[in-house]
Image (tube, grey):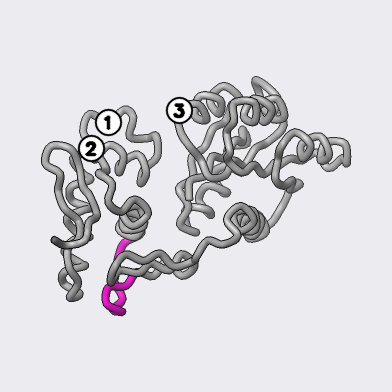
Amino acid sequence: MKILLVEDHLELSKSIASYLTQEHYLCEVATTFDEAREKLILFTYDCVLLDIMLPDGNGINLLKLLRKDGVESSVIIISAQNALDFKLTGLSEGADDYITKPFPLPELHARIKAIMRRRNPHKNNVLTFLDLTADLESMECRVQGRLLHLTRKETNLLLYFINNKGRMLTRQAIAAHLWGDYTDNLDSVDFVYQHVKNLRKKITDAGGTDYISTVYGLGYKLNAAE
């Protein structure tokens, strides 16, 4: 799950981003109105955590633009403004929730999960592809029932493959999914090869079938073995 945190308080943004990363989210940070606007134009996010008071603009105006552009990301306003008028304005402009600073990080996490459940009420918490399974709550992945000892990046990579089974995924797309837009300025994303190689080896070492095929010169695809 990909989250954009729009927050200009550096210590708070660092704390929130670190916590959410530990909870297996991909969290990107924007500290200004313009930076957030650019990211929302270029990238897709499942959820936006939006501060109201930004150094170069107002978060409510950003929310209006977001909804005007048809962006379907969930939005949680995080603000020190506790007045009822602010809450009503934010919710009426399309925010899904409003949480007042300061707040416990586990509460923020619970609100994120609640919103995603409401948006996907019938979503199964276990992804499957043939004999591969991935539990989205425990983040445990198994092949033929045997637990795979994966790193966080390998786990997210396997989830990405299962969610896009049958589709060709470029190395650039994989890099952007796992590391966010920080890969924009990299000259090469060849490091993706090593992560894919490690994942394939761990699956086969556990007795599973390597369903990940290489599309030479382009990327990779998760397919049933022919």
Residue 7 sits in which quadrant? top right
| SS assignment at label 2 | loop
The residue furthest right is 84
The residue under the point 48% across, 40% down is 28
Q: Which amino acid does the dot numbered 3 rest on?
A: Leu
The residue under the point 36% across, 57% down is 159
Badge 2 crowding class, 10 Å Cα cut-off, few under 14, some 14 to 19, many 20 or more, is: some
Picture coordinates of residue 74 (x, y %)?
61, 44
Residue 133 located within the stretch drawn in magenta: no
Residue 148 located within the stretch drawn in magenta: yes
The residue under the point 87% across, 40% down is 83
Q: Nearer the viewer, residue 84 or 8?
A: 84
Q: Which amino acid does the dot numbered 1 rest on?
A: Leu
Q: Which residue is mark 2?
A: 189
The residue under the point 57% across, 31% down is 31
**Mark number for residue 42?**
3
Q: Which residue is mark 1?
A: 186
Counting residues from the start of the chain, the first of labels 3 and 2 encountered is: 3
Left or right, 147 with respect to 123, comes to left
Q: CA distance from mark 3 to mark 1?
A: 17 Å
Left or right, 86 with respect to 180, comes to right
Badge 1 crowding class, 10 Å Cα cut-off, few under 14, some 14 to 19, many 20 or more, is: few
Q: Is residue 98 above or below residue 157?
A: above
| SS assignment at label 1 | loop
Highlighted magenta segment, given as a residue range: 141-151
